[in-house]
Image: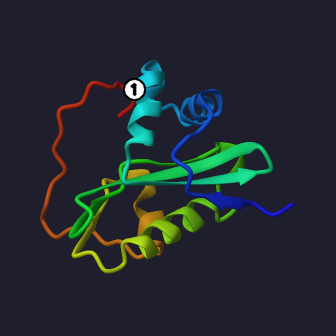
């Protein structure tokens, strides 16, 4: 059966936490906040094999000019199968007319995001106050 994409904001907590844990994201220590954050995103795109969550990406936006993509995760067992690229393409299409589409990339994923059409943002530097331990 082919992999399907969904725009539903309601996602099963156990599968979301398993996806984030498989990718070693520290937000798994706050599962209720993680689910609330996804549910309150401007949009979420998830990838499914029947009833199994394979990946997801979300967007936070002002709804007019700027969109930020904070999360893109695919089960490690399914990396390299085009799932992440399909999720990114769906999100980019939704926000194609926006003035600015932004994400922060780990150095290991810069090449992937370049293939998806993103580029290094000039001489800017990412900055944060971060309560995790996975970076």
Q: How is the image coloured?
A: rainbow
Q: Is residue 97 left or right of residue 1?
A: left
Badge 1 marks a residue whose secondary structure is helix
The x, y position of residue 58, in whole percent, is 43, 52
Residue 18 vertical placement versus 77 (above, below): above
Residue at position x 64%, y 65% in the image: 82
20 or 6, which lies in front? 6
Q: Is residue 79 left or right of residue 132?
A: right
Residue at position x 22%, y 59% in the image: 62
Picture mark count = 1
User: Which residue is labeled 1 in the image?
Assistant: 33
Residue at position x 35%, y 25% in the image: 133
The x, y position of residue 24, in whole percent, is 51, 31
Q: Quadrant of the N terminus?
A: bottom right
Q: Quadrant of the C terminus?
A: top left
61 or 18, which lies in front? 61
Residue at the extreme bottom of the image, as rendered: 97
The x, y position of residue 69, in whole percent, is 36, 55
- 10 Å neighbourhood of mark 1: few (<14), some, or many (≥20)? few
Q: Quadrant of residue 39?
A: top left
Residue at the extreme right of the image, as rendered: 1
């Amino acid at each position: 059966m082919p992999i399907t994409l969904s725009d539903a904001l309601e996602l099963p907590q156990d599968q979301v936490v398993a996806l984030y844990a498989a990718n070693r994201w520290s937000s798994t220590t706050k599962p209720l906040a993680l689910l609330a954050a996804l549910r309150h995103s401007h949009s979420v795109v998830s990838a499914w094999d029947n009833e199994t969550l394979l990946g997801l990406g979300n967007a936070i936006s002002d709804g007019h000019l700027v969109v930020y993509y904070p999360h893109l995760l695919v089960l490690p067992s399914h990396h390299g199968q085009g799932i992440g690229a399909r999720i990114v393409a769906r999100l980019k299409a939704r926000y194609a007319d926006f003035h600015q589409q932004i994400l922060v990339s780990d150095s290991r994923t810069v090449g992937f995001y370049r293939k998806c059409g993103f580029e290094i943002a000039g001489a800017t530097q990412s900055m944060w106050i971060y309560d995790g331990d996975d970076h």
